[in-house]
Amino acid sequence: MGTLGRAIYTVGNWIRGTGQALDRVGSLLQGSHRIEEHLSRHRTLMNVFDKSPLVDKDVFVAPSASVIGDVQIGKGSSIWYGCVLRGDVNNISVGSGTNIQDNTLVHVAKTNITGKVLPTLIGDNVTVGHSAVIHGCTVEDEAFVGMGATLLDGVVVEKHAMVAAGSLVKQNTRIPSGEVWGGNPAKFMRKLTDEEIVYISQSAKNYINLAQIHASENSKSFDQIEVERALRKKYARKDEDYDSMLGITRETPPELILPDNVLPGGKPVAKVPSTQYF
């Protein structure tokens, strides 16, 4: 680095340092109303090698989720907080209307003990519960994987089949349509009822709607968030629907009711309501 280069570098350091100092002063002046932004290297969508995620515009990917490499996600699906879909050594395909819930891990297998090349294929309108592990397997349309379940290489969960929460499904196991499997290792437990099959489909629809709400909230600017917070604070004690949602009943203490002769008509008038919770 020549003399000019060193001078420019020094000026750059000075400018950056001055900017940081001004930011700290500004934050102190704003007090409790300040918003601090922290630089994060986290990327929701990340390329790896020459592969990049292909995600439909209507998909909700939570800010803390990671979709990496050769991953394709269809319309209306949702990838929730803390999920990792890592398509580095093989590909992952997620259909339409599928929800992969918080802290779930989806990975693939390039090779395994049987020598098979195993991508992970998840169909349409599938529900995958919180903290599941899906590795090198196939989950067909409208199947259900319970919370904390682990599906190992080569597993096939057929349409309208259910894996119970906390189950471990061994390699190359096929779970037939209309059956519930559970345990460690997972075994056949019983047949699904018609109501449970309908519930699987309804669960996927519910998550499509819920994802739209979360997507809307996550797209708001800091200014919008601050305005809404101020409005909630202002109207929290006045809105009957808000009170009902929180389970609040408001009663007026006797000492705050004005005497009958204060206003024409002789009707008692309350000055300030109190709040009780039940």
Image: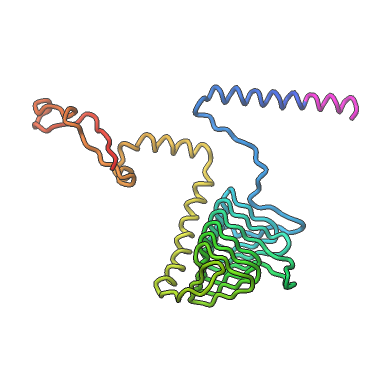
- The reply to whether residue 76 is in sight is no
Asked where in the image residue 57 lies, by quadrant, the reply is bottom right
Q: Which residue is found at the position 81% from the left and 27% from the top?
A: 9
Using residue 202 as the reference point, say whether residue 72 is left or right of it. Answer: right
For the view shown, which residue lies furthest in the front direction? 184
Q: Tell me if residue 6 is in the magenta stretch.
A: yes
Q: Tell me if residue 123 is in the magenta stretch.
A: no
User: Eyeballing the image, is 122 above or below 230?
Assistant: below
Q: Which residue is found at the position 51% from the left and 60% from the top?
A: 147
Q: Nearer the viewer, residue 221 or 171?
A: 171
Using residue 63 as the reference point, say whether residue 269 is left or right of it. Answer: left
Asked where in the image residue 248 lies, by quadrant, the reply is top left
Q: Could you tell me which quadrant the C terminus lies in?
A: top left
Q: Position of residue 155 (x, y in %)?
A: 61, 71
Residues drawn in magenta: 1-11
User: Eyeballing the image, is 240 above or below 2?
Assistant: below
Q: Nearer the viewer, residue 99 or 261?
A: 99
User: Eyeballing the image, is 44 above or below 110?
Assistant: above
Using residue 170 as the reference point, say whether residue 266 is left or right of it. Answer: left
Query: Main SS type for the magenta part?
Result: helix
Asked where in the image residue 51 lies, by quadrant, the reply is bottom right
- The reply to whether residue 1 is in sight is yes
Using residue 33 as the reference point, say whether residue 74 is left or right of it. Answer: right
How is the model colour-coded? rainbow
Q: Could you tell me which quadrant the N terminus lies in?
A: top right
Q: Position of residue 265 (x, y in %)?
A: 9, 32
